[in-house]
Amino acid sequence: MNLKLKPNIGIVTDEVSRNLDEALEICNDWGITHFELREGSTGRAPAFTADELKRLDRLVEHEGTVTAISPGIFKGHIEDVSAWRHEAEDVFPRAIEMAQRLSCNTMIAFGFEECDNRRENRLLVLKAFESIAEQAAEAEIRIAFENEPGFWVDRPQETIALLEEIGHPALKLNWDAANLHWGGMEPDDEAVDQLKGYIVNLHVKDFSPKDPENPWTPLGEGIVPWRDLLPEILTNIPLSHVTLETHCEPLIENSRKSLDYLLNLIG
């Protein structure tokens, strides 16, 4: 892959180990300096311990980079008002504080699972996204929605229609091509072209339909066409990093396999 500027390779820390110190030590040996924060030892971000936060402070002070915070918000139904308002009014503000502490400007969120009364609920989703976009903009944070099968943020055409209707610059995408494939649509150049104006974060993992109960594999062992897809993405989208998301046990071994494959792809 001939790129003028090669992206940094990052990883989700708990895809190596839930023990943050262990994950960072292993990644240091691998030459990784860019990290997405999702699960800590006691829970999902922002529920990291005081010691974990101090360790992350030191990471950032010594030229490590936190690329995104992933608190797992907005995975339920929009009709579950008490749940998503708790996420919007409590979890999200605390996650913003964590991001600001660690000089991170990207928050990963999900797009609410689709449910009945599609037209009415789509309007509720729009209003919820508009509200959290304002919170994010005030904090100088961008929200990168991750596509997930069966969610309002899923396939490219519907996702773009939703984001364009809101029209807020704080709302972007964390694109997961394997999730798209998992949902029955092969990711291709057309999808990249449709989404390129919104993608600010990229998850790299692999998918195989052979075992529906356990569909994730080390990178290069599944069917996601990364060898063709990644050059198209990196040629058309100015990403400073791409993020490995292993998703299959044993984590350390398969993260290393995936890293080697990705290094080979990027060259």
Image: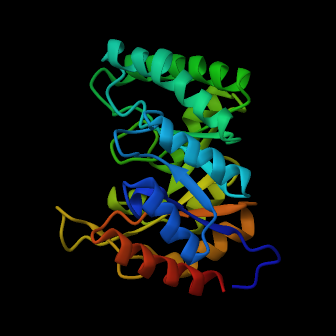
Query: In x, y percent, where is residue 126?
Result: 52, 22
In the rendered picture of this protein, how many numbered marks are placed on residues? 0
Query: In x, y percent, where is residue 177?
Result: 47, 61
Relative to 112, say whether 260 is above or below. below
Query: In x, y percent, where is residue 28?
Result: 57, 70
**Residue that extends furthest to the top in the rendered view of this protein:** 82
Relative to 187, say whether 108 is above or below. above
Is residue 75 or residue 57 the one in the foreground? 57
Q: What colour scheme was applied to this rendering of the protein?
A: rainbow
Is residue 111 or residue 70 the one in the foreground? 70
Is residue 216 or residue 79 the one in the foreground? 216
**In what quadrant of the picture does the N terminus appear?**
bottom right
Asked if residue 158 can be seen in this view, the reply is no
Q: Tell me what residue is drawn at x 38 percent, y 63 percent.
A: 181
Q: Tell me what residue is drawn at x 27 percent, y 69 percent.
A: 249
Q: Is residue 164 left or right of residue 108?
A: right
Specify the quadrant of the image occupied by residue 119: top left
Q: Tell me what residue is drawn at x 80 percent, y 73 percent.
A: 5
**Residue that extends furthest to the right in the rendered view of this protein:** 4
Q: Tell me what residue is drawn at x 49 percent, y 45 percent.
A: 146
Asked if residue 169 can be seen in this view, the reply is yes
Query: In x, y percent, where is residue 167?
Result: 68, 28
Q: Is residue 78 left or right of residue 126?
A: left
**In what quadrant of the picture does the C terminus appear?**
bottom right
Relative to 213, say whether 140 is above or below. above
Is residue 162 or residue 13 the one in the foreground? 13
